[in-house]
Amino acid sequence: MADEWKKESPKLAVVVPCYNEEAVIGETLTELLDVIKRLKSSSAIDEGSFIYCVDDGSRDRTWDCISDAHSGDATVKGLKLAANKGHQNALLAGLLSVRDSVDCIISVDADLQDDINSIVDMIEKFSEGYDIVYGVRKKRAADSVFKHYSAALFYKMMHALGVKIIYNHADFRLISRRVVDSLSTFGEVNLFLRGIIPLIGFRAASIFYERKARKAGKTKYPLKKMLSFAWDGVTSFSVAPLRLVTAVGAIIFLATLAMSAWALYSKIVGLVLPGWTSTVLPIYFIGGIQVMCIGIIGEYLGKIYMEVKARPRYIKDMELF
């Protein structure tokens, strides 16, 4: 059941993480302001609702653009981080910075690929009592063949590993204040919000939209970063790779026993064949498996190391509020 305060026009904050978005941030804020004004005029949201941009240590004029927009319209507010900490940390910084002053928060990237008009549908779902509203892409027609199939493989793999994740959903979503309060209790340094939000629970719904092409600027997720992001998601939410190491070790052990039995039999009946292939290939095979397993274990040890240090996930530089 919806909380009592949801019956009134909710106060909304739209959190926009930004990194080197000078080329597009002005147009993004113009379109967001238009949606916010329409929602205010229809009393769908409170008059105090606002946009909150988080500059993730940009090296261009992104912060200057945010400051100029704030000077022209106080609806635009912002936070500048002292250094680049990555999209997930920048998003979390925005969520935690505004949670005490709003009823709900919508997160959206600055590249205008997500359908900003879907914010209206999200607010309607929130008024119906949903604490989480996921923005889900209807299809991936604009993606390259590689990106389309690699994304599908990623979601299937995450589900197979037992990770609760919404198919074709990125970080375009609405969450209520109590969801953010719950999110704040997660102290992990290795953030993967797409996996954490579904873990929290509460009543959830999805709205579907057509994703657009980026209007300006460059993507912040080239192939290397996409693969790193996917690996972080797997290792942050599943111990299946470690169990795979155990399974591989057991299989190799059984295969070794079988080979040993075959070698003894061959020796007894005089079928021993000369040659280095039968010796070298197993050594290479087992050596490769060992290196791979050590690498997987190392990834988890590295994550434990980062968590144990408990360094701050981000440091604030300045804020416009």
Image: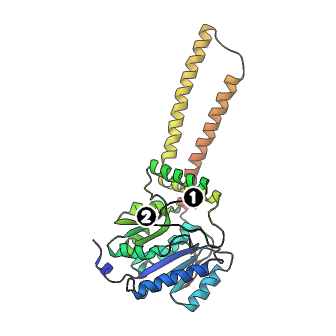
* Amino acid found under the numbered disc labelled 1: Phe
* Mark 2 element type: helix
Q: How was this image coloured?
A: rainbow
Q: Which residue is painted at 43% across and 56% down in the image? A: 164
Q: Which residue is painted at 52% across and 31% down in the image? A: 251
Is residue 67 in sight in this rendering? Answer: yes
Answer with mark 1 or mark 2, whichever residue precedes in sequence: 2
Q: Is residue 285 found left or right of 7 in the rendered image? A: right
Find the distance from the CA under tag 1 to the CA under tag 2.
16 Å
* Amino acid found under the numbered disc labelled 2: Ile
**Which residue matches tag 2?**
197
Q: Are marks 1 and 2 in contact (CB under 8 Å)?
A: no
Residue 253 vs 295, above or below: the answer is above
Looking at the rendering, which quadrant does residue 280 occupy? top right
**Which residue matches tag 1?**
229
Any mark on residue 42, and which?
A: none
Task: List x then y, in percent, for residue 240.
Answer: 48, 46
Q: Which residue is painted at 66% across and 72% down in the image? A: 217
